[in-house]
Amino acid sequence: QTTAAATAAMMFPGGASVAGSDVIRVGIIGCGGRGTGAAMDVMRSSDGVEVVALGDLLPDRLAQCRAALAKETAGNAALAAKYKVTDERAFTGFDAYQKVLATDINYVILASPPGFRPAHLAAAVAAGKHIFTEKPVAVDSAGIRSVLATYELARQKGLGIGVGTQRRHQAEYIPTIKRIHDGAIGEVLSGQVFW
């Protein structure tokens, strides 16, 4: 998936210039499989992107992510130049997300479990970061209300938030969904859906 990378391109149109810099500095919060994959996706996306900070609640997840990223970037000078995480920018514990947000990143990818997402999203907006967040953005009604309030604050601050709902916007899917809604296969009574 390259959703996070595409979101970064949308947030910084016309190139990767960010506040006088030609580099988008990315932090990853949540270093499991999706966070590790998102780090690779964003590094492969384009020039002018660097992953500079990682954070996860669990030390073993962070270690696995760092090992996977080191392995993927080894022998590939272009990718290795985009992987800038040092020991001082690799954080664990319940406050790891705060430590990532306190670095000089300007774009953060939220890939932690969705129960944490409303709090992480609010903290990222408070810190003035552009955001890509995985879905779902919350798991309960209180979380959804929090996310909606955070979204309004992000709009006021001029911050971009992208969410990993790519299938809802993918060109190949939209005409098919329209045909189903228009009754092309009759009335849908039930279904099992994947993706």
Image: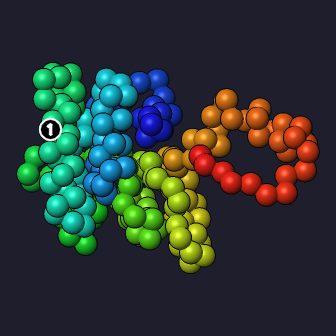
Q: Quadrant of residue 174?
A: top right
Whether residue 6 is visible to the viewer of this picture, yes or no, is yes
Read off the residue under disc 1.
Answer: 70
Looking at the picture, how far across and down is residue 73, in whole percent?
A: 18, 31
| Residue 59 image position (x, y, % from top left) | 16, 63
Splitting the image into 4 quarters, where does residue 44 fall?
top left
Viewed as shown, does residue 123 lie left or right of 167? left
Q: Name the foreground residue: 22 vs 90.
A: 90
Kindly identify the amino acid type of the residue bearing the numbered disc 1: Ala
In the drawing, does residue 128 fall left or right of residue 81?
A: right
Taking 146 as reference, is 124 above or below it?
above
Up/down of 14 relative to 56, above or below: above
Colour scheme = rainbow
Q: Could you say which quadrant of the image residue 69 lies in?
A: top left
Residue located 59% across and 46% down the image: 195
What x and y, as percent, mark residue 121?
A: 43, 62
- In the image, 78: left or right of 36? left
Please name the residue shown 29% across and 46% down the image: 36
Q: Give percent across and percent down for residue 113.
A: 40, 64
Say if residue 11 shows up in the picture. no
At horizontal 36% and vertical 60% (from top left) the residue drawn is 112
Quadrant holding the N terminus: top left
Q: Which of 76 and 11 is in front in this view?
A: 76
Q: Residue at x 20, y 33 (%)?
A: 72
SS category of the residue bearing label 1: helix
